[in-house]
């Protein structure tokens, strides 16, 4: 007698495939039986409240806010120029390296140290000089520009 072409492993794999098919068919039948066929549109509707949360009740029309398209800004908002007197500051040069061409000015109002480069000075400055200047934001932070000596 010859040996059967089907080995035990082949039979086991075939049985597992059959079981998987049966389970899949059972899940399909249970989904069909539990489906909400014929439910109305109102039952399927979901709403978003004023806080952005999903709810089943419609939002209150009294809490509705009107938003105009002109009020929406995309990108960086434009900066409003302030008074020229407000941008003009006074301070004292606390450090100056003439060889390298930079220094620091201590602002009288904020007591902040602000970087200054000699190319932005209109008058020659020295340490402990009283100066007036404007602040400009550069790539590395605030720097003083239009620096003038005060008498």
Image (cartoon, rainbow, N blue to C red):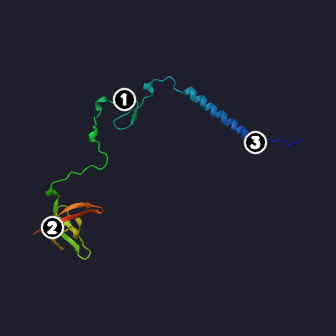
Please state the horizontal and vertical placement of residue 46, each as a whole percent of the image: 42, 31
Is tag 1's residue or tag 3's residue first in the polypeptide sequence?
A: 3
Corner quadrant of residue 48: top left
Please state the horizontal and vertical placement of residue 68, each as a whole percent of the image: 27, 37
**Element marked by disc 3:** helix
Disc 2: CA contacts within 10 A as few (<14), some (14-19) or many (>=20): some
- Identify the mark at residue 128; answer none if there is no mark: none
- Identify the mark at residue 148; answer none if there is no mark: 2
Which residue is depicted at the point 22% across and 69% down? Answer: 119
Image check: 46 left or right of 143? right
Which residue is depicted at the point 22% across and 72% down? Answer: 95
Corner quadrant of residue 72: top left
Which residue is depicted at the point 34% across and 31% down? Answer: 59
Q: The C terminus is located in which quarter?
A: bottom left
Image check: 117 left or right of 39? left
Could you tell me if the residues under marks 2 and 3 are in contact, i.e. CB atoms within 8 Å? Answer: no
**Element marked by disc 1:** loop
Image check: 107 left or right of 68? left
**Element marked by disc 2:** strand
Q: Is residue 101 placed above or below 35 in the rendered structure? A: below
Distance of mark 2 from mark 3, alpha carbons? 94 Å
Is tag 2's residue or tag 1's residue first in the polypeptide sequence?
A: 1
Corner quadrant of residue 118: bottom left
Distance of mark 2 from mark 1, alpha carbons? 64 Å
Is tag 2's residue or tag 3's residue first in the polypeptide sequence?
A: 3
Towards the viewer: 136 or 20: 136
Q: Is residue 69 placed above or below 124 in the rendered structure? A: above
- Identify the mark at residue 58; answer none if there is no mark: 1
Q: Is residue 83 visible?
A: yes
Task: Please name the residue that numbered disc 3 is placed on.
Answer: 10
Disc 3: CA contacts within 10 A as few (<14), some (14-19) or many (>=20): few
């Amino acid at each position: 007698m010859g040996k059967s072409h089907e080995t035990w492993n082949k039979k086991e794999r075939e049985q597992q495939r059959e079981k998987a098919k049966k389970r899949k068919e059972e899940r399909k039948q249970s989904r069909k039986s539990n489906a909400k066929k014929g439910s109305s549109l109102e039952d399927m509707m979901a709403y978003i409240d004023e806080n952005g949360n999903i709810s089943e009740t419609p939002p209150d029309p009294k809490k509705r806010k009107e938003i105009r398209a002109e009020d929406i800004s995309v990108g960086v908002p434009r900066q409003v120029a302030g008074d020229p007197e407000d941008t003009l500051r006074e301070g004292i040069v606390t450090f100056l390296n003439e060889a390298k061409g930079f220094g620091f000015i201590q602002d009288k109002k904020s007591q902040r140290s602000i970087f200054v480069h000699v190319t932005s000075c209109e008058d020659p400055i020295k340490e402990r000089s009283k100066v007036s200047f404007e602040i400009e934001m550069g790539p590395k932070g605030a720097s003083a520009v239009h620096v003038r000596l005060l008498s």
